[in-house]
Amino acid sequence: MEAQAFLARVSAALGGASAPWTPPDTRAAPSAPRRRIELLHLHAEFASHLAKVGGTAELVPASQAAARAMELLGDGPRVHVGLELLPACVRAVVARGAAIGPDSDPLDWRAACAEAEWGVTDAVQLVAETGSTLSCATARRPRAASLLPRRHMVVAPLSRLVADLDEALTHLADAPSQWLLVTGPSRTSDIENDLTIGVHGPGVMHVLVVDEDEA
Amino acid sequence: MSGLGLHDAFLDRARHALGQEHLKQAVRRTTDRLRDGRAAASAEAGAFEAWRDALSEARRRAIGRLDVVLQAWQVRAEARGVLVHHAVDAREACDIVVGIARAKGARLAAKGKSMLSEEIELNQALEAACVEALETDLGEWIIQLAGERPSHIILPVVHKPRGEIRELFERHGGEPLSDETRVLAGYARERLRAEFLRAELGVTGCNMAIAETGSIALFSNEGNGRMVSTLPRTHVALMGVERIVETLADFAHLVRLLPRSATGQRVTTYVNVLSGPARPGELDGPEELHVVVVDAGRTAQLAERDYRDALACVRCGACLNACPVYSAVGGHAYGTVYPGPIGAVIEPLYARDDERRAELAEASSLCGACHEACPVRIPLHDMLVRLRQDNARRGRGGATALALQRIAARAMAVPFVYDAAGRIGRRAARLAAGGGQLGRWALGSAPVVRELLRRRALPDVPIRSFRELWDELEEER
Amino acid sequence: MRAILAASAAARLSSSAMAERSEAVGARRRVALMVTCLVDQLAPEVGIAVVRVLRRQGVQVDFPRAQTCCGQAAWNGGLADEARALAERAIEIFEPYEAVVVPSGSCAGMVHHGYEEIFRDDAAWLARARALAAKTHEFSQYVVSVLGLVDLGAARDGTCAYHPACHATRLLGLGDEPRRLLEAVRGLRIATLARAEDCCGFGGAFCAKLPELSDAIVGAKVSHLAQSGADTVVSSDVGCLLNIQGACKHRGLPIEALHIAQVLEGRKGGAA
């Protein structure tokens, strides 16, 4: 059915056309940058909620971030997105060897994601209330890096922590093609109510929170 | 046969369910677990009631002006490249999806979990058009392999023991497996991965649309919803016309309440919000995103003050878990796509002339636990009473039974008739209790009483009623 | 559950003794008893217990003889017109009184919630219904919230489990009034009842129309009761109590079902 006719039926059922809709004002009030102590507090909350669902988070000083990433990633194939804002040494570690990034050809990209042991991504925000990472799909940040590999690592600076969903969502009024809240590894209880971790999405989720103030 | 006519089909299926020990235990274990989860999640979150108020208001507000909200959503969705279709009924919805599949030359449609697609029987339509429709949600895939229907809105396969699942997978893959959950889930991961990468078409439902940004949101835990909305070139999302909120702020309340109400999780593993297909320069994501807005009996509810609020449903399943009837017999006993309290209300509304669905209004003790559990406070228990009124007005339930009930109700209004009936009834009961033939016959002749007496000891029936004793009680003073 | 009216000499004696003490509390209060058809016909001892307990507190109790039924069964059965007729009748009979006490959460709930639904399109009747609802109290609500009493000097040896009746809690909003009253009963232990808030499967006509289903539901309630270790189950609603009692007896479980008023009526040694 044509849109107008369809909507006319809805109006009729409502007893007449409704008054025109006015969009809400969802611009986020620009918030002052949080103090470090607040961010540390939020990180603790974030890590605690993430741990409850089988994910892990750790806070590392910027100087140690590269070494830690290297330790976690090992030598296996990996894909990465969105690391340009991170310290160069971290980028270098992640991008070394067999890594494939968002400049690749789409088919190569997909194949690489499917074979990768790790997908490394950044996050627009880390949401303390739920232990979630928020990511947005863009040309520089394709989607499959956090979906196809067996393990998913998020690398993001401490300053990206926000308190709650309300705060996180107000930044999304200019919606990207996809935004995604990820909270831990994939899971299911479909079989006899028995929880198992790692179904179709990654079975491991680790968040490396980089503390840029601690050299 | 209960003797009261209206609900025999339900009764038969319920009886069947009650005779299956494993099913009964599985259903009860599941509903207990989910109820406890919800209770823990709502206790932990101090603002739970405030969120319920907020989400209830948000849903009713959107539904109250659904025409302009839908229009606003469509304008914004189309501006971001979404191809929007409208389907009045199930048939049209299936035609649209099949049409898209054909246009894209799709041979395999990988499906995320969608109750709406069950409702419109999309898989059958796709198969008829030679498009393989593959369920990828673990529970739904198991159901599909077994040729069954889901028994719960959130956990479709609670009724199936793991041994049966293992056998299904072994027959499917030709290789032996163990009963361990990890192994079974691992098998699903491996087999379905190839399909995700192969499918030309991804089909999902839509948990909620967001008008402000022209988006659709998908909540999932397994990751299959993300797979089918990311990898295939074409993504089709089925959206019930009423599944919409106006703003991102409204949506935040849903994110807080839907997972908690459904399973007790703080949040589902993935909340995936799509606003259009992949944009120029993006390496992955679908080239086309189609949203099919489906009416299928929902718009009519807008016009009914008694039932409009049922459109606020967010399909969390909390009412199922809270319901003593559902917990006793499970979803299949209802014989409908949507079971439990919400099913007992909306199924008759989606098909007003279907007697089989109309009888579901009787499948309730009206305890009100559903209303108490509902995140958007739908008064399901009151709606069931209204549905019973509809049934009575239409003469459903057997003319004789209804007539008798009416007579009894009217008799209640006349004191001496009420009194006399009480005396006679008590006398018969006392005769029956005393082993008297006449009394037994009198009681047993009413089939309903006979069935009840099979399962309950008779109470000690008093000789005199309270009103007969009142004068003595007054003298006590 | 049965108490013979004749054997209550002791009760009468203590009645008059109590009357002096309660001058301050219930005196000058007057209520009409909406006895409910279930109590009237199948459990008059509950009505008697309510009257005695209230009189001990000095409350004067009237019994409008013309009353029959609040209309709940008809309403729940889908018979809207018949339910309305009964509701109008009930309103007319009870509205002259300053307060109405009901030994049933579901019937009180009908007056509060059900009448809102019945009269929603009739402003005049709705106003009268609301006026009646404002002064209609379930028995334990009346004792705790209106009389302001929790300890009535009752005594009973044993262990009881409290079953919160569905309509009482969900339609009427009955809270912990019954529990608080039970806690003040000397010698009475209150056991923990698992999933206490679960329906008992009575549902009025439901248990007769869908007996196997009702049976499965009451079966769960009975097994929770057995686990609780209680020798008595107490509730605000006779429908629930009859249903549970019948199920317990049928399964050979020696648990007695009592209305809260019957527990409160009890004096030393638990004689009721």
Image (cartoon, rainbow, N blue to C red):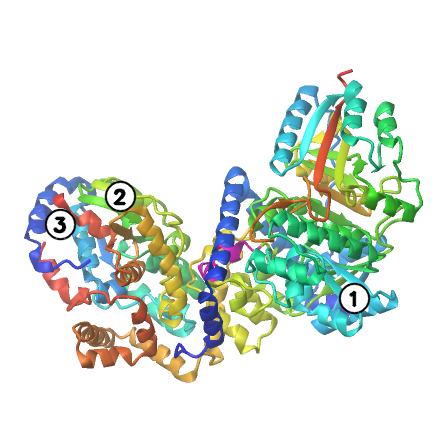
Residue beneath the point at 57% across and 61% down: B310
Dot 1 crowding, Cα within 10 Å, few <14, some 14–19, many 20+:
some
- In the rendered image, which residue does mark 3 sit on? C271
Is B374 colored magenta in this rendering? no
Q: CA distance from mark 3 to mark 2?
A: 18 Å
Residue occupying the far top of the picture: A215
Which chain is disc 1 placed on? A
- Stretch in magenta: B317-328
Considering depth in this image, is C4 or A76 the residue closer to the camera?
A76
Q: Quadrant of residue C83?
A: bottom left
Q: Which secondary structure lies at badge 1? A: helix
Amino acid at circle 1: Ala
- In the rendered image, which residue does mark 1 sit on? A3
Position of residue A120 in the picture relative to residue B398 (left or right): right
**Vertical comparison of A12 with B215: above or below:** below
Q: Which secondary structure lies at badge 2? A: helix
Position of residue A69 in the picture relative to residue C16 (left or right): right
Counting residues from the start of the chain, the first of labels 3 and 2 encountered is 2
Q: Which secondary structure lies at badge 3? A: loop
**Vertical comparison of C39 with B268: above or below:** below
- In the rendered image, which residue does mark 2 sit on? C181
Which chain is disc 3 placed on? C
Amino acid at circle 3: Ala
Is label 1 or label 3 in front?
Answer: 3
